[in-house]
């Protein structure tokens, strides 16, 4: 397998599949349930309005898991960090994941389009703040000092993803687009391949299985991310 060209600008989209082998469960592997909750219950503004304490508890557990000794970046995250370090051109990672495993692995240029577990947001001022602690309804907001104003800084269903202008610019300029471990069913991320391709980028998909958008890619690499990403990175750097 070879690439037949030397890319100058790489954009990599990652999804839950890249963190699966670090012990973080993907979204669609559990019959519409996410860690035993209906997704809409814990990942929608309506769910938060109905039961904010349940939603806080859910994200508190996800945050605790991320900060625990159980979860570490895997070979796929590490390989992408090495690629960013050794690649001579421009490279950015757009992730749908709310974990910080890319950053823990050493990646610098990471765009979190669905927010971050280690950030919280004040609903009154819109300010985003770093946070490693549990949040409860009665936790006072450090910026407005009121209770009940904090929410996870995470994009929920029905909300607009973050940094879209920057993402569209990157996708329109890249010559190599790589999608890793994402099911291709959640928009707008599912259409990034079409945007990159229509601007002339070569497109590679890495996944355990074929996805709904596999046919849009020029190359499909099938297998666990920890193995396939390392091989792909060697191919690009060779
Ligand atoms: P999904 O759970 O929808 O899909 C995970 C994908 O990873 C599937 O295509 C699997 O085949 C693949 N996969 C699983 N394990 C893998 C492995 N070890 N190596 C390679 N591939 C593997 O997750 P996402 O596509 O990331 O949004 O979901 C997109 C968005 O839907 C999420 O960001 C989240 C969710 O609702 C929000 O929270 C806003």
Image: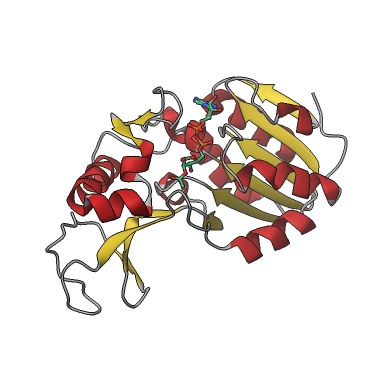
Side of 237 where 218 appears, left or right: right
Residue shown at 81% from the left, 29% from the top: 2
Tally the numbered discs: 0
Q: Residue furthest left?
A: 138
Q: Is residue 22 visible?
A: yes
Image-quadrant location for residue 172: bottom right
Q: Is 144 in front, or is 96?
A: 144
Query: What is the x, y in percent for residue 144?
Result: 23, 80
Query: What is the x, y in percent for residue 90?
Result: 70, 57
Q: Which quadrant of the figure contains the C terminus?
A: top right
Query: What is the x, y in percent for residue 96?
Result: 51, 46
Query: What is the x, y in percent for residue 182?
Result: 56, 34
Image-quadrant location for residue 234: top right
Colour scheme employed for the rendering of this structure: secondary structure
Q: Which quadrant of the figure contains the N terminus?
A: top right
Residue shown at 25% from the left, 48% from the top: 55
Q: Is 82 in front, or is 8?
A: 8
Q: Is 11 in front, or is 236?
A: 11
Above or below for 140 versus 14: below
Above or below for 154 versus 213: below
Side of 74 where 132 appears, left or right: left
Residue shown at 21% from the left, 75% from the top: 142
Q: Is residue 238 visible?
A: no
Image-quadrant location for residue 73: top left
Side of 31 where 199 appears, left or right: right
Residue shown at 16% from the left, 60% from the top: 137
Above or below for 216 versus 146: above
């Amino acid at each position: 397998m070879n690439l037949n060209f030397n890319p100058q600008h790489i954009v990599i989209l990652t999804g839950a599949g890249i963190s699966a082998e670090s012990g973080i469960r993907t979204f669609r592997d559990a019959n519409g349930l996410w860690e035993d909750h209906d997704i809409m219950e814990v990942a929608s503004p309506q769910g938060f309005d109905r039961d904010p304490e349940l939603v806080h508890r859910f994200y508190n557990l996800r945050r605790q898991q991320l900060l625990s000794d159980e979860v570490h970046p895997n070979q796929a995250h590490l390989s992408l960090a090495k690629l960013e370090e050794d690649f001579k051109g421009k490279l950015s990672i757009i992730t749908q994941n709310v974990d910080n495993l890319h950053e823990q692995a050493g990646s610098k240029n990471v765009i979190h389009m669905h927010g971050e577990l280690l950030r919280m947001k004040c609903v009154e001022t819109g300010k985003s703040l770093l946070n490693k602690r549990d949040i409860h309804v009665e936790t006072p907001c450090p910026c407005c000092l009121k209770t009940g104003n904090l929410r996870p800084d995470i994009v929920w269903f029905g909300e607009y993803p973050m940094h879209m202008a920057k993402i569209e610019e990157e996708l329109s300029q890249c010559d190599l687009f790589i999608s890793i471990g994402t099911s291709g069913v959640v928009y707008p991320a599912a259409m990034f391949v079409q945007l990159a391709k229509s601007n002339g980028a070569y497109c590679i998909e890495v996944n355990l299985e074929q996805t709904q958008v596999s046919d849009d890619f020029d190359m499909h690499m099938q297998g666990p991310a920890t193995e396939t990403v390392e091989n792909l990175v060697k191919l690009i750097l060779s």
